[in-house]
Image (spheres, helix red, strand yellow):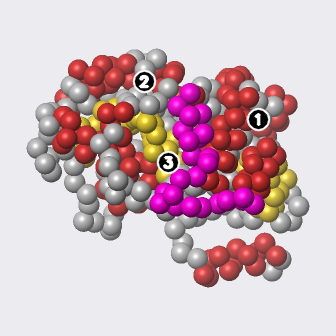
Amino acid sequence: MNASENLIATEQRLGAHNYKPLDVVLTRGEGVYVWDTDGNRYLDCLSAYSAVNQGHCHPKILAAMVEQAGKLTLTSRAFRNDQLAHLYEELAALTGSHKILPMNSGAEAVETAIKAVRKWGYEVKGVPEGKAEIIVCSDNFHGRTLSIISFSTDPDARTGFGPYTPGFRTIPFGDADAFAAAINENTVGALIEPIQGEAGVIIPPAGYFKRVRELCTTHNVTLILDEIQTGLGRTGKLLAEEHEGIEADVTLIGKALSGGFYPVSAVLSNTEVLGVLKPGQHGSTFGGNPLACAVARTALKVLTEEGMIENAEKMGNYFLEGLRSIRSNIVKDVRGRGLMLAIELEPEAGGARQYCYGLKERGLLAKDTHEHTIRLAPPLVITKDQVEWAVSEIEKTIT
Ligand SMILES: Cc1ncc(COP(=O)(O)O)c(C=O)c1O
């Protein structure tokens, strides 16, 4: 066994098998590239599920992290630190939000929003205690905690983990009439991904979110957009809601908020919703810590100052055009927005995973999702030459 085979064997022996990674052991990353322990270089077309939008080991984020790590890393929220207020200010200026709650993982941000919106429902909307309902969509992915998997429609995510948290009403994604029909006097919120990432980059019909926004406003329902994957430049806009010409009441961000250096997430909201939380009602030891804040501040700065969002739009269009020009009888659909792209293969193609292994052999890392779909989401710093190279390697693999 060589070194990487040894590492894989040890992982298999000692680790819980809650993931099924491609067998490539990575040791270094820079920009769009990662290297394995045998020295092979790969173009990363997953970006750690869109957490590494700024590219691997961005030097400015690294410098901010190292500097802050040498000064102060954690105070807990029992005391204040000199980074959090700056992060609040910069996030508010960038997104227009009025209240912010920092957490760590994406799932924690989702849980936070659910708690806040339920409390808002009881205290502000006047829903009877214990009756709050939140509308969610089938094929959603919002994380792995018990409440979140309680409203998952994916049997792998949900089966065997009951009893489940009640209070969620599931409707088909992209169906505004179903959304209208699901609202009742106890509906406090709607939790939706602007584009369903894990489901295979599913883009809703044009006008869907406009109608959802109108319905939420009319019925005093809080619209929560989970932009943990779609946000922070991935789709060619800072937030994917901009494509729809709407504004959510609550926006969830995570992943690229730290450029992949550290788990940082946040709930962005108007004053009314997050305003219901009082001392002692929610928190996290690490949420809002100075290291996380310093990293997030720089991650946001490089995202905007280095033109990554504009590049995502331009390179995304170019990538999509390239993929659409591939003639292959195993391709069922090619879709995407910005650098959130997917190739859906015909069921007869025998599953996307084997093609991901084929791509790996050619130096491109991508991940299958939902059996037949190859998702492509490179760091937002990808260049035209790199897109052209990727399209050509993908073409060789699937034709
Ligand atoms: C849309 C969306 N929401 C929430 C999450 C959960 O984030 P985390 O894995 O950081 O808990 C993810 C992760 O893939 C996601 O894509």
Task: Please report contact status of discs 1 and 2: CB closer than 8 Å, yes or no.
Answer: no
Give the residue at x 44% y 49%. Answer: 109
Question: Is residue 215 depicted above or below 80 in this figure?
Answer: above
Where is residue 376? Give x, y as percent: 65, 40
Outermost residue to the left: 128
Q: Tell us which disc is closer to us: 1 or 3.
A: 3
* Residue position marked by numbered label 3 in the rendering: 102
Give the residue at x 38% y 52%. Answer: 111
* Residue position marked by numbered label 1 in the rendering: 381
* Residue position marked by numbered label 2 in the rendering: 247
Dot 1 amino acid type: Val
Dot 2 amino acid type: Glu
Asked if residue 50 shows in the view, the reply is no
Q: Tell us which disc is closer to us: 2 or 3.
A: 3
The magenta-colored residue range is 69-93
Residues at marks 1 and 3, CA–CA distance in whole angstroms: 26 Å
Q: Secondary structure at mark 1?
A: loop
Within 10 Å of the Cα at label 2, are there few (<14), some (14-19), or many (20+) other Cα atoms? some
Looking at the figure, which quarter contains the N terminus? bottom right
Q: Dividing the picture into quarters, in which one does residue 303 lie? A: top right
Q: Secondary structure at mark 2?
A: loop
Within 10 Å of the Cα at label 3, are there few (<14), some (14-19), or many (20+) other Cα atoms? many
Task: Please report contact status of discs 1 and 3: CB closer than 8 Å, yes or no.
Answer: no
Q: Dividing the picture into quarters, in which one does residue 156 lie? A: bottom left
Dot 3 amino acid type: Pro
Where is residue 45? Give x, y as percent: 70, 44
Q: Is residue 82 magenta?
A: yes
